[in-house]
Image: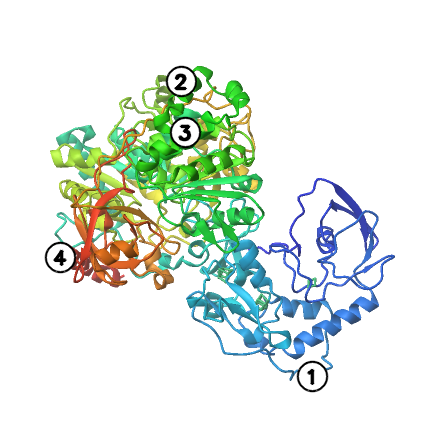
Amino acid sequence: MSLIQEIDYGTPESKSEKLVTLTIDGAPVTVPEGTSVMRAAMEMGTQIPKLCATDMVESFGSCRLCLIEIEGRNGTPASCTTPVADGMVVKTQTDRLKRLRKGVMELYISEHPLDCLTCSANGDCELQDMAGAVGLRDVRYGYDGARHPNPGIDASNPYFTYEPSKCIVCSRCVRACEEVQGTFALTIAGRGFGSVVSPSMEQPFIDSECVSCGACVQACPTATLNEKSVIDIGTPEHSVVTTCAYCGVGCTFKAEMRGDELVRMIPYKDGKANRGHSCIKGRFAYGYAHHSDRITKPMIREKITDPWREVSWEEAIQHTASEFKRIQAKYGKDSVGGITSSRCTNEETFLVQKLIRAGFGNNNVDTCARVCHSPTGYGLKTTYGTSAGTQDFDSVEQSDVILIIGANPTDGHPVFASRMKKRLRDGAKLIIADPRRIDLVRTPHIEADYHLPLKPGTNVALVTALAHVIVTEGLADEQFVRERCDWDEFQDWAAFVADPRHSPEATEKATGVPAELVRGAARLYATGGNGAIYYGLGVTEHSQGSTTVMAIANLAMLTGNIGREGVGVNPLRGQNNVQGSCDMGSFPHEMPGYRHVSETATMEMFEQFWGRPLDSEPGLRIPNMIDAALDGSFKGIYIQGEDILQSDPNTQHMAAGLAAMECVVVQDLFLVETANYAHVFLPGSTFLEKNGTFTNAERRIQRVRKVMAPINGYEDWEITQLLSNALGYPMHYDNPSQIMDEIARLTPTFAGVSYEKLDELGSVQWPCNEAAPEGTPVMHIGGFVRGKGKFVITEYVATDEKTGPRFPLLLTTGRILTQYNVGAQTRRTANVVWHEEDRLEIHPHDAENRGVRDGDWVKLQSRTGETSLRALITERVAPGVVYTTFHHPSTQVNVVTTEFSDWATNCPEYKVTAVQVMPSNGPSEWQEEYEELSKAARRIAEPLVAAE
Ligand code: SF4
Ligand code: SF4
Ligand code: SF4
Ligand code: FES
């Protein structure tokens, strides 16, 4: 295995369809118009020396190393800034060019520190390479030239260093930050010889606007910006291509290794979701994989108050199987169930639901997607026929108007946000519907054309008001609707939205959004060209989550914004494999491929293949399992990779339900909060230690490849297999590709998927079958999957969670860039530098009314419970709205969220809780007790871990 070296073509690819033929060094080459001579030469295998050019950013032409001669033209132009022309005759290597290049390199080297042998980039430095490429043997000016300003090394960022003395001021970092990441955190300060790269206002990186995406580090040709891991370990010597295990963007990375040690994660340019970019989490926050908190040996205990007892895998598996058998014999076959993980692979998820349906003999399987995007599944299946987003990420490059509803892409889906920001800088218009002033409302070089700051819980009223304007002002695409949708249903729906009670003026009181803003935004979306909708949990996690998804689907059909590039309805999925866990049949009513358990033909096919009778009645959802546990009828649960105690609503209720069970099995990396209620702990494996696939928000199935052996001994799918065999339902897979073959055989939308195809194509987007052998980037072209698009009437029903004198504020929740979900992974990395605790964002007016100052402890109280955290006073939230994240168990904001949930899917209403905020002296009593309990749980486990 060797290090995968991707070719650097020097300048970005031209998208032109017109071809141009020129001659380079006597050989003809044909490339798209707009290609640089440098890239054309590289396409034919000729690498022109370069320093300031790299193909992730536009050319700049500053280093003058890439000079060429062109027949019939004077001078020696830079090949990186010279576009090709038909009939052009180019020479890349003449005596004059060699002389000039050597002269340039002499100047660079004369003022560069010559500590190559001890430099962390030795062997991985383009300056070194270019010295070799131009044949530099001597430096006429000596090696004692003045140095660039050298204020010392800035090591303030936990993941990379900045050593200005090594800087050649090529500006690749500055351009990467601007063009690829879109943060504009870097500038070149000073002039001439004294110029130097500067983060923000000449601040240390940690205090600057830098978001630690790593694009500048990747772009830097020298050791000026370098990963600390490379400085510590050395340069990598082999690499494996795999997929990020954090969010639903699904970035592809090269895991670069030295032996079996991971040196760094480098975003892969061929990755179709990320196109060579990354965010801080995938790029740097992988240290949790070797954190000392990891549990690597199975543990069991009789009661949850007992200390853990470390046991062999054999004992743990036999004990678990006999417990489940005992429970089923005593309480009936429906008394047990399981939860699949949206963090695990498709293959692992498939096996867990198979174990439950065929091994346990019931459909009591659910997943954390229940608490995030289940309304997406319901809403898009009802209206379009498929439970998934309609576009690929590339599609955003063709969008003219982008409508973001209830999503915060720069924090939640940062790499896609960077691609979106690029399109916005290039001229696309932006509408944002969100209670908060998210970053995209106003960020460098981007300002939203409309920000609709709606009150939490009023999405349906707002989206229906947008439709009202489009219908009543005659802005609908009638031809599209007549051709592609059910016309009768449309007419009923159009009459409904046209009712004056749905006008922006009539709904203004409920939504809080001025009517003229709604009218302007509706006109822009309907008439501004390709309109694309992106939405997130701010849409789904409501009592009317499914209704909002259908309202959004209506809006896209109404304007003909579906079925081609640049348009569509796109849920930004939260966890890395939340799409996949839904696809794999993790819900109690659906088999893999979203087929209802009551479909006879489907069930017969599975029964035949799995060799067991299957239940045709839907099983229990997570909240039903907890209720049934409290009723005494549900006694055992197998939870793979999900911390339901922290991620699900109403923590006390969840805790009581778990405590009422006789066998709680948690399979995870750490003793997560749910493990406090577990009788069996089965140590899980990280994405670095397993093979499989993840499916991202674009329905893209991508390989996860093992880069190191699992430190617990097994990949997660192997543990499920062991358990199934012990339960008496045999499974015999040698590797996950065999599981994927079974998925393909049993699931029509996956029929064409195999590891062979994924290795060949890099990735495929489902549906992938005979009709679409290479997958489907954009869905519903020419017709909806369900036939005619269905307009659904979306009556706004205000949530039962109301503000009043006791609870006058509305709490909404979300995430932050550096942390992920319940934080089990990111809290165990250096990312805590940026977010060591959850804070409560509160508007200055609301803070002042309550005598709260920035940083004060406040008590956050709802009808359900209370917690304390520190206040952050900000105008990002409107008066009357407060906001916090849910990354830290010490805050456990879900103790205040309610049990209200989406009417169709039970997705919890996390985004609307009526609360009161008041000053407090510190953590609440229960938080202190909880901290003690958690410490106790860890104290019991620690000697076992240390004894390994
Ligand atoms: S790490 Fe990313 S955000 Fe920070 S300076 Fe570099 S490119 Fe800009
Ligand atoms: S820090 Fe690196 S990329 Fe940036 S200007 Fe200096 S040498 Fe170039
Ligand atoms: S955007 Fe998401 S998938 Fe990409 S690196 Fe960041 S966390 Fe990973
Ligand atoms: S690479 Fe062309 S001028 Fe620097």
- Residue 721 x %, y %: 33, 39
Asked whether the residues under the numbered discs 2 and 4 touch, taking CB atoms below 8 Å apart as contact, a structural biologist would say no
Q: Nearer the viewer, residue 920 or 765?
A: 920
Q: Which of 662/525 is in front?
A: 525
Q: Are marks 4 and 3 in contact (CB under 8 Å)?
A: no
For badge 2, the amino acid type reads Asp
Look at the numbered disc 4 and give the secondary structure of its residue: helix
> Residue 422's spot in the image, x, y percent?
55, 49
Q: Earlier in the sequence, mark 2 or mark 3?
A: 3
- Foreground tag (4 vs 1): 4
Point out the tag, 3 or 1, that comes first from the N-terminus.
1
Disc assigned to residue 925: 4
Whichever of labels 2 and 4 marks the residue nearer the N terminus, that label is 2
Q: Secondary structure at mark 3?
A: helix
Q: CA distance from mark 2 to mark 4?
A: 55 Å
Which disc, if any, is residue 142? 1
Say if residue 765 shows up in the picture: no
User: Which one is in front, 527 or 936?
Assistant: 527
Q: Nearer the viewer, mark 2 or mark 1?
A: 2
Is the Cβ of the residue at disc 3 closer than 8 Å to that at disc 1? no
**Residue that label 3 marks:** 380
* Residue at the extreme right: 72
Residue that numbered label 2 is attached to: 492
Distance from label 3 to label 1 (Cα)?
A: 69 Å
As shown in the figure, which amino acid type bears the numbered disc 3? Leu
Query: How far separated are the C-alphas under marks 4 and 3?
Result: 44 Å
Crowd rating for badge 2 (residues with CA inside 10 Å; few <14, some 14–19, many 20+): few
Reading the chain from its start, which is encountered first: label 4 or label 1? 1
Task: Classify mark 1: helix, strand or loop.
Answer: loop
Residue 348 rendering spot, x and y as whole percentages: 37, 40
Q: Specify whether residue 481 is in view.
A: yes
